[in-house]
Image: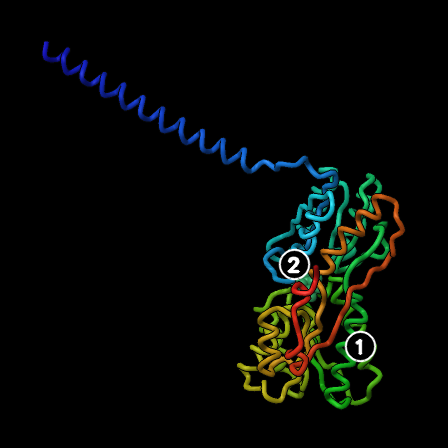
Amino acid sequence: MKRVYYLYIFLIVLLITGIAFSFSFYKKADTFDEKLTEAQPSSSVPTYHFALIGEEMDHDYWRLVGDGAKATESIYDVFIEYVGPSRSNPEEQLELLDMAIKSKVDGIIVQALNDDFTSLINHAVDAGIPVLTIDTDSPTSLRSAYIGTDNYAAGQLAGEALVKDTGGEATVGIITGSFDNAHHQLRIEGFRNVVDQVEGIKIVAIDESNITGVEAEEKAYTMFSENSEITAFYGTSSYDASGIIAAANSLNREDDLYVIGFDTLDENIDLLQNGDIDVLIEQQPYEMGYQSIGIMLDIIKGGSVEEINHTDVTAIRKADLANWTREKDETP
Ligand code: BGC
């Protein structure tokens, strides 16, 4: 009799616990549903879905490109899917381009790092998807237009700054992001075009950093150790100048070294401010992203589109910093 009694008690407790759990689960599911409903866009889905494919998401330069493009979602009837490898990885970037083609987006905006991008860009265009290149062009492809820096002219600007500031006397080492990437090749060609005409300037060594600060430092250290006559360095990628300076500091050579770098990342601005970097070549990544969407819409709607849309490049020195603001702060 006692055993039956305990069994009843046990069953009742089990029942109550079951009801309590079901109720709590129901409440959670209900709250989740409410959140989902809140997350649904109140308006309808935008007419145009564009893919923007950059070089590296975990990088301030590309964050600005993305911010510029995304800012247009409140102006135009567009949704921008902004994707890219977290760190520079051309193969992954090509896969993302392939995926964008397969998912039949309405337009693709892509940085065309090298010749491997040409056939996929052509494939997209053949499939009816217009392509706009950004930051790095692929002029031989079927892309409709390019928006970004004139990388050859940016190299010339760096060369002119070096000639001016050194009085035409310098022994130069170059650290470039990658020998394979079109924009870095152009930045070197433009630089050479200027300095090769000046007798007192000699380029004695060149190596690649693979778009990392660590490799920039390693390569600059080796280059400096093997060529102690170097008086100036030119870095063509965002992290090259800081890598060069770290190497120069380890070798106690920073004081007499002239350094030109690319991009106004915060750390580069600090190094310009404290005199370690002499000149920074400033690009307009936010503007590139921002303008790219209007251009893509013009392409789609058959409006007249300039094939080449160059954004500004400027050489900035420490003295310019007093009146300098980051471009994002100025763009609407
Ligand atoms: C280049 C970009 C590159 C970025 C980060 C910029 O100087 O224009 O192409 O992705 O640096 O390496």
* Contact flag, marks 1 and 2 (Cβ < 8 Å): no
Q: Quadrant of the N terminus?
A: top left
Residue 295 screen position, x and y as percent = 81, 52
The amino acid type found where label 1 is placed reads Arg
Residue at position x 74%, y 62% from top?
A: 181
Q: Quadrant of the C terminus?
A: bottom right
Residue 25 screen position, x and y as percent = 38, 28
Quadrant of res 165: bottom right
Is residue 200 in view? yes
Specify whether 108 is left or right of 208.
Answer: right
Which residue bears the numbered disc 2? Answer: 62
Q: Is residue 34 above or below residue 158?
A: above
Residue 238 screen position, x and y as percent = 65, 68
Residue at position x 74%, y 38% from top?
A: 47
Disc 2 residue: CB within 8 Å of ligand 1: yes
Is residue 91 in view? no
Q: Give the number of the mark in front: 1 or 2.
A: 2
The amino acid type found where label 2 is placed reads Trp
Specify whether 203 is left or right of 243.
Answer: right
Specify whether 122 is left or right of 324.
Answer: right
Dot 1: what SS?
helix
* Foreground residue among 20 and 139: 20
Specify whether 174 is left or right of 143.
Answer: left
The Cα atoms of the two marked residues, 1 and 2, are separated by 27 Å
Which residue bears the numbered disc 1? Answer: 192
Residue at position x 75%, y 81% from top?
A: 161
Q: Residues within 10 Å of mark 2 (few under 14, many from 20)?
A: many
Dot 2: what SS?
helix
Q: Earlier in the sequence, mark 1 or mark 2?
A: 2
Quadrant of res 167: bottom right
Q: Is residue 41 above or below residue 207?
A: above
